[in-house]
Image (cartoon, rainbow, N blue to C red):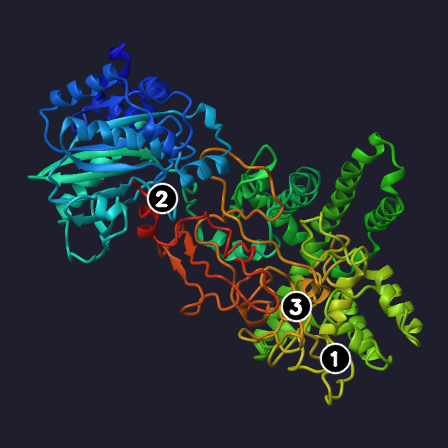
């Protein structure tokens, strides 16, 4: 039976994984590919089961004697290596796999010398399979303990001059054209255990060292050695078919590969972005504070918003935009955000010319009389009258299709009338340039009467009137969410409640989060959000409310935008053209005041209401209403897709960042961590200066009166693939 208990490393490969474990199988593949690997042998999983039996704890394994025939087989294999010091390493069947490496969960023994000492080290490797950390790790990954067995690799020690680890892809950015190396003098165990600060290098595809950071030993590798390491690492990755985490050593000038394991949780390769994508990407990113749910994607985003954008830009300019490429999904789970890359077609010149002619011949005010708009509003009213609980299944599943058909009407209206609006704005720009009054253009455009501006003005009026209702200011400023029923219980508040209900009837269709995320409630279904906005606009004590504007500027959240605000007499809520004024738009179009809190100058700060700080991961309205922001979570690892979570962050493509100070107070947006970008609070580190770069954001603990103590869910703070806090930290858990 000894022939099945101990095998030479050169005789095993990937097909033998159940009997030799992941590490031994990988080493066998490397030997078969001609890679220089220290000679050795593997004590198989059959030997583990034969020796250990049903033992399932460290003491039980250590107290079980090794059968004599197995012990003799190990001694014979050790003598075959010529004796001397060896490394004894675990090679479990659930180890060094594409989905989980189990790095640091089992024990490694170095410089073991003597047959009996090797046998004892093998037994201690077996016992480490049942260590507390190993059992806990398997439980978290859902690995059945009955399916796990331990093989053990014994290799001749290499007298390393320098050693370390390398990744054949950048573990932070996901770039496959970069090799990341850590190196130190002496054995590599000092590097992988984190006992030393290694020299850190990044090597480009052509072998050039593009980044070097000295460690405790100063410069360890020459540029030539770094290039040689990168070539060897890429050869290993090519041989094994995926990016690898490789341990290596230089001994007497010879490069030796000690082991290789698949890289897990590796981000997808960065998508190179054009200038247009990097400009408009952050704009679209504001609409996605969280990952869309599968039903939001398939029933709303793709058939309505996505098709609307595709057909509108195609009708106006003959340009092709594929919304499926913007939010690529797997099994309806969105994997990534990639800014749209419009592509001109042969129809583009004709469509652009047609739009110009149409704009010159049309009156931009004609869109309000378009009969398709009346059909659209009638259809929306019909849908709004439906009670989902009363619908048959066939009627219920037809609702998204009916909504998509209504949005098609909006698309047709915009294709027909937007050119006239563009031409009118162009004329305004020309006149302002000729008269030297370019600064007035923004005020003229934003000052146009719109539904959003009307909503803002009514919110201001509600806030001013609330200040006159006894007890209402104190109620709105109390801890916890405030409901309409709570306000109605106040003496003398009924008139104000009636006005609030009229406001909700007129504007309750607006979204609390984003027009893309229909799972989140509207204002009508979440009146507490509107009450939170009213609270943010309450006049500060002793500050007279300016007529027609936002009272109390500078003292309350939403009013402290610092300097010039929006068009509504200093109102902090941004006015945008939508379905009832300015340019034509869909129902609930534009941007809700609940999401764009401030159109002030960059650098304005939100001053939260006393007693309720603005929690990271929540909009201003959400914090005011008492809602909580979800905690940040990392991306799924390479081993499989976890169940979908609506707060599960996903990575934007390379180079996309939120725009500081544009439409949000202090350059912050809902979900942004306070102090992001400041020293000591979280640093945004670009991995490259051009398109295709990603950023890695350190995530310190967030504490505060409105904080969960966890990193916030944000596409900037959590939307990047979860990576170790530093590259050195990622190697510290290795065996």
In the figure, is residue 66 to the left or right of 160?
right
> What is the quadrant of residue 513 in the picture?
bottom right
Mark 3–mark 2 distance (CA, rounded to whole Å): 36 Å
Which residue is more in the foreground, 670 or 208? 670
Numbered tag placed on residue 661 in the rendering: none
- How packed mark 1 is, by other alpha carbons closer than 10 Å (few <14, some 14-19, many 20 or more), is many
Q: Residue 470's quadrant in the figure?
A: bottom right
The percent coordinates of residue 701 (x first, y second) are: 49, 61
State the image coordinates of residue 562 (x, y, percent, origin top left). Answer: 60, 80
* Between discs 3 and 2, the one toward the N terminus: 2
Q: Residue at x 59, y 43 (%)?
A: 318
Q: Which residue is mark 3?
A: 597
- Residue at x 80% of width, y 74% of height: 475
For the point 41% across and 48% down, the residue is: 723
Looking at the image, is mark 2 or mark 1 nearer the viewer? 2
Residue 173 visible to an observer of this rendering: yes
> Hey, which residue is sitting farthest left in the picture?
252
* Circles 2 and 1: CB atoms closer than 8 Å: no
In this rendered view, identify the residue nearer to me: 263 or 448.
Answer: 263
Which residue is labeled 1 in the image? Answer: 549
For label 2, the residue is 175
């Amino acid at each position: 039976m000894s022939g099945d208990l101990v095998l030479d490393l050169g005789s095993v490969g990937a097909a033998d994984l159940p009997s030799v474990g992941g590490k031994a199988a990988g080493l066998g593949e490397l030997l078969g590919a001609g890679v220089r690997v220290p000679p050795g042998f593997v004590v198989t999983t059959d030997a583990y089961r034969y020796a250990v039996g049903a033992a399932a704890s460290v003491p039980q394994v250590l107290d079980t004697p090794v059968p004599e025939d197995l012990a003799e087989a190990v001694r014979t294999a050790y003598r075959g290596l010529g004796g001397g010091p060896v490394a004894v390493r675990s090679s479990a069947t659930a180890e060094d796999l594409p989905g989980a490496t189990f790095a640091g969960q089992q024990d490694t023994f170095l410089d073991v010398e003597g047959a009996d000492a090797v046998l004892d080290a093998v037994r201690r490797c077996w016992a480490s399979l049942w260590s507390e950390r190993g059992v806990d790790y398997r439980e978290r990954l859902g690995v059945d303990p009955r399916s796990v067995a331990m093989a053990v690799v014994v290799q001749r020690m290499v007298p390393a001059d320098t050693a370390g680890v390398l990744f054949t892809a950048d573990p932070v950015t996901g770039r496959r054209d970069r090799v990341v190396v850590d190196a130190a003098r002496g054995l590599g165990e000092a590097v992988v255990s984190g006992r030393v600060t290694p020299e850190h290098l990044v090597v480009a595809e052509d072998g050039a060292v593009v980044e070097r950071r000295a460690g405790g030993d100063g410069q360890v590798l020459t540029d030539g050695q770094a290039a040689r390491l990168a070539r060897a690492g890429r050869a290993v990755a090519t041989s094994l078919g995926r990016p690898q985490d490789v341990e290596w050593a230089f001994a007497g000038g010879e490069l030796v590969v000690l082991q290789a394991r698949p890289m897990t949780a590796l981000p997808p390769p960065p998508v190179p972005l054009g200038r247009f994508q990097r400009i408009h990407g952050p704009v679209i990113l504001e609409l996605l504070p969280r990952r869309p749910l599968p039903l939001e994607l398939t029933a709303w985003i793709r058939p309505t918003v996505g098709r609307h954008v595709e057909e509108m830009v195609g009708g106006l300019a003959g340009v092709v935009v594929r919304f499926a490429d913007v939010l690529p999904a797997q099994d309806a789970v969105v994997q990534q955000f990639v800014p749209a890359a419009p592509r001109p077609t042969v129809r583009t010149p004709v469509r652009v010319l047609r739009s110009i002619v149409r704009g010159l011949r049309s009156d931009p005010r004609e869109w309000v009389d378009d009969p398709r708009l009346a059909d659209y509003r009638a259809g929306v009213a019909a849908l709004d009258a439906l009670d989902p609980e009363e619908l048959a299944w066939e009627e219920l599943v037809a609702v998204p299709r009916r909504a998509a058909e209504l949005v098609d009407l909006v698309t047709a209206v915009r294709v027909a009338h937007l050119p006239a609006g563009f031409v009118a704005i162009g004329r305004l720009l020309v006149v302002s340039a000729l008269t030297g009054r370019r600064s007035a253009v923004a005020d003229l455009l934003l000052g146009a009467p719109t539904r959003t501006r009307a909503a803002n003005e009514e919110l201001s009026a509600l806030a001013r009137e609330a200040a006159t209702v006894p007890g209402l200011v104190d109620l709105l400023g109390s801890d916890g969410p405030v409901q309409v029923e709570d306000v109605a219980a106040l003496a003398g508040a009924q008139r104000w409640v009636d006005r609030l209900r009229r406001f909700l009837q007129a504007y309750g269709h607006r979204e609390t989060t984003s027009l893309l995320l229909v799972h989140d409630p509207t204002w009508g279904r979440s009146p507490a959000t509107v009450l939170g906005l009213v609270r943010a606009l309450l006049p500060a004590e002793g500050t007279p409310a300016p007529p027609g504007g936002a009272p109390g500027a500078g003292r309350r959240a939403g009013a402290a935008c610092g300097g010039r605000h929006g068009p509504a007499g200093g109102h902090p809520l941004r006015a945008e053209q939508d379905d009832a004024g300015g340019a034509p738009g869909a129902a609930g179009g534009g941007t809700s005041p609940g999401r764009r809190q401030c159109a002030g100058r960059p650098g304005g700060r939100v001053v939260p209401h006393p007693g309720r700080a603005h929690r990271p991961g929540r909009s201003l309205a959400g914090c005011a209403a008492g809602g909580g922001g979800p905690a940040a979570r990392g991306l799924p690892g390479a081993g499989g897709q976890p169940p979908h979570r609506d707060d599960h962050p996903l990575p934007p493509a390379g180079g996309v960042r939120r725009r500081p100070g544009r439409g949000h107070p202090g350059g912050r947006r809902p979900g942004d961590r306070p102090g992001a970008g400041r020293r000591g609070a979280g640093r945004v580190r670009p991995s490259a200066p051009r398109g295709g770069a990603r950023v890695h954001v350190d995530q310190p603990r967030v504490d505060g009166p409105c904080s969960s103590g966890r990193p916030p869910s944000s596409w900037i703070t959590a939307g990047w693939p979860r990576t170790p806090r530093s590259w050195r930290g990622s190697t510290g858990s290795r065996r």
